[in-house]
Image: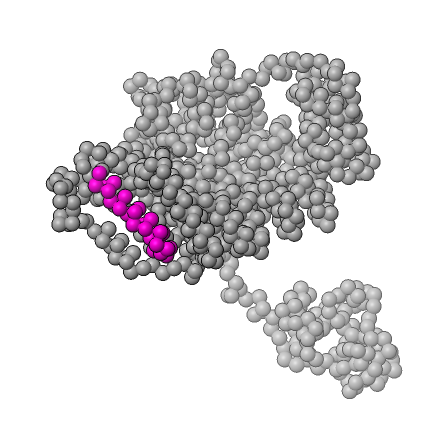
Amino acid sequence: MHLEIRQPLFSGRREVRALWFDLALLGEIEARRRVLAHWQAGSQLFQACGGFLLAWPMPRWEHVDALDALALCQVGEVLSSAPLSDAELAALPSGAYWLVRAGVAQAAVPEARVDPSPWLALGSVALRVPLAPPRAPVPESMVAPMSLQEVLGAAMPERSAESIAFQREAAQPMHGARRERSAPVGVVVADVVIGSLARWFGVKPAADGGGAGQSRQAPPGPLSRLLSDWALRLASATRLSKLLGRRQANYLQNMLDMFANGDLAQALRHAVPIDAIGGGAARPALGTPRPRTSLTISGPSPAATAIGLDSDLSAQLRATYRRSFEQLDREGRIDEAVYVLAELLQCGLEAVTYLEKKERYLQAAQLAATVELAPAVAVRLWVLAGDIERAVQVARLHNDFDAAVRLLESRNSEHAAPLRRHWAEYLAARGDLAEAIDAIWPLPQHHSLALACLVQAERSGGTLGMQALARKLALMPGTLRSSAAAINAVLTAPGEDGVQLRARLAVALLDTTPASASSRRVAAALLRKVLPDRIEGLSRLDKKALVQLAELAGSAVLSADLPVFSTRADIDVMPLNARGEPLVLSMDERGLMPIQYARSLPDGQYLLALGEGGVVRIGRDGRQLAHYPVPAEHLVISHNGKRALALVKRDRKYRVSRLDLISGSVSDWLTLELQHWSGQYDGVSWNVAMERRLAVLDTTAQHQSIVWQVASLPGVIDGYADRAGVLTILLRVADGLEQWSYEQPGRQLRQRDWWSDIAGGDLAWIEDMRVLPGPSGAAPYVVTIDWVLGHILVRQHGLPALPPVALGPNAPRKVLIDGQWLVLIGEEERSMCCRIVSLNDGVERARIVLPHHSSARFSFHDGRLLVFDQAGRLVDVDCETGVASTLCLS
């Protein structure tokens, strides 16, 4: 029976006895969630009228308008979802539950009883699922150079049968019947020996990796160079050199005949790159060239050999290649024309420009990576090819948005604005909010993003806050009135913090261009404050900055009258390596909070890892400024000090958390099995070593994202150093030690050298010796202990030892070499002693002693040494200024 009801719902606070949930409206999952949210002990659940009917054991007073279900209240002898009048109640037949829907009363007869306990079963829920080891990303997800065959695809011609037969014949040792009749036995033997050396000890490319820079052929190792030199001397001492020259000449003549006869297909198979015939710095080739299996572009190679030809023959060959290119271009054979330009003539930029002229943007972008053109060119071409994602990936890897954006804007490209927006988002992700504002401001439609960055930067305070204030005054002069309170707070701030704030605002105003009228007004007011600060020696602003600030304020008279400053603060600043006596610090005071790791931040602050106690950011006075509730035993800091990673070891893996030091937010990120990692990163890309591979992780991605990698390293990583824009690793291989160096941020391989006579490693003293990564392009450092003389000797392998360093009572536990500094930490009489030694003269420049503790650690980055221990003590030594400070964490 259906009866129309005049008032269909209750309102206000009512004594509710039951709730009804509409399955058709809510869905099964949401209805279950709401039932469980309202469940009480002793409740009963039924299926009724196409929904769930939840009956409470006792009535509850509820505000029915705020409930997420239909409330049923006691009306006479029934439960109803509407306030029934006496007439309406009398007209209803007997029944316990009544629902009023669409103004009509319907009997809600309870059907089957429902047991909600299976809804809470945890059998299908994994309470703890360990994160699996990272998967190797597909090659398409990383920026990897391609061969020309991959770029041009099916357009490449098939290899001829004659070429295959020629290569097979050339690969086999020549029999005596086919040798030159006049060649003596010694020449024949030398020919076989040199051929074997060329095959077995020739230069081989670096191990293949999935990242950019791996197309470059590795330089020859010491053994390869030694054997090659010996082979050259053997060839010169016999008549074999003349025989080789005759064979090479015959090969080139046959090749030129193919070009002259118009047989371009075969001529290109036999053609030799122009850099392989010019000699110069290249090593002489010990064999004849061979036909190519495919028209692939090899890219630049520091290990290439050359056939020595005079300049006339080289010019003739170059002219022949140029004519063949012009002919191929006229015939519309674009792919082969590109091959001639890029591989034979070694004109990579011209080849890419040629493809762009033909509007083959995708191939041009791929070829730009193969021939290693400037990243800005590749980014622009990927944009023109319509692959914005790949363009952004290349730009992020090389940190080269600026040049690409300006290049596109100079050509009035419609793609410049989207790339500029990605640039601003990338800078904001790194924490460079001031730079992000500058990048996005030329796009009026995205000013909201700039304002969001501006607000966030202002709230952070410190240097970033001053930069944001300066940019707001320059970009939006009308905000001077609304910013008056913040400006006045900076001008009147007391103490050392106030002096530093005013100095930072002065620098920010000078760095922000163009200046507005509001910027000049603030500069005038600021000059009246920073000038007395500077005269009293409280600030370190130099006269040049003060003159520029006066010019910005428009006060030419004051600019001319500024005095020469020479204050006590200037005189007391002395670099550590200029001190006559070593800096000695001994800290007896003990704190209460153990410091697991420490890093310095801008504005004189520190970030401390307290183990399971989380991470804290403190000021120079030890006052806590922020707390980040994630466990940490190691810290990785971005270059700008606005982002950080917190690492803690869990079994064999490390749990990594992300810290935003601007907003104060934290997030648990990944669990990784790491062997080595860089202590600094750019805020987005982080270098790590794991599972015998080098990788770069995108720290802004929600899950693991590898943007560059070198997989299947030939050995175990014994040493790892990331400093001064170079990533260097030492690999323990089966027959010695290899040092690889990558230039950053593009990660191009610049060194791969091998030594068979170096033992030891970075992890432990082996026969009183350790091996540490050396500078890029040089040999590793070998650190040895001479117990008889009481010296520590440091030398680069193959070079004379540097001046000896005095040895303490025990061998150092940890040794670090960074630039001109040698850092040693070890135990001396139940105290931990950290020494800073100048490598050039072996003189100890600083000694830090933490008494009565044997677990001190240190971090050394950019000439800044922090020594800390479990007793809450922290010592900070700046090698550039010679200034030291201490604090105790209580």
| Residue 828, above or below 469 | above
At a point 83% along the width and 68% down the height, the residue shown is 11
Residue 617 location, quadrant: top right
Q: Nearer the viewer, residue 163 or 641?
A: 163
Along the line of sight, which residue is nearer the eye, 30 or 192? 192
Front-most of 239 and 680? 239
In percent of width and height, residue 540 lies at: 65, 21
Q: Is residue 517 above or below residue 696?
A: above
Instruction: Specify whether residue 648 is in view.
Output: no
Q: Is residue 21 magenta?
A: no
Please tell me how many numbered marks the rendered image carries. Answer: 0
Q: Position of residue 881 (x, y in %)?
A: 56, 21
Q: Please give left or right for residue 694 compared with residue 69 in the image.
A: left
Q: How far across and how far down the image is residue 675, in percent?
A: 42, 43
Residue 576 percent across, percent down from the top left: 51, 19
The residue stretch that appears in magenta: 242-267
Q: Residue at image x 19%, y 42%?
A: 191
Helix, strand or loop: magenta stretch: helix
Q: Is residue 265 magenta?
A: yes
Side (left or right) of 51 relative to 649: right
- Can you say which quadrant of the picture contains the N terminus? bottom right
x 68%, y 40%: residue: 438
Residue 551: in sight, yes or no?
yes
Hey, which quadrant is residue 461 in on the image?
A: top right
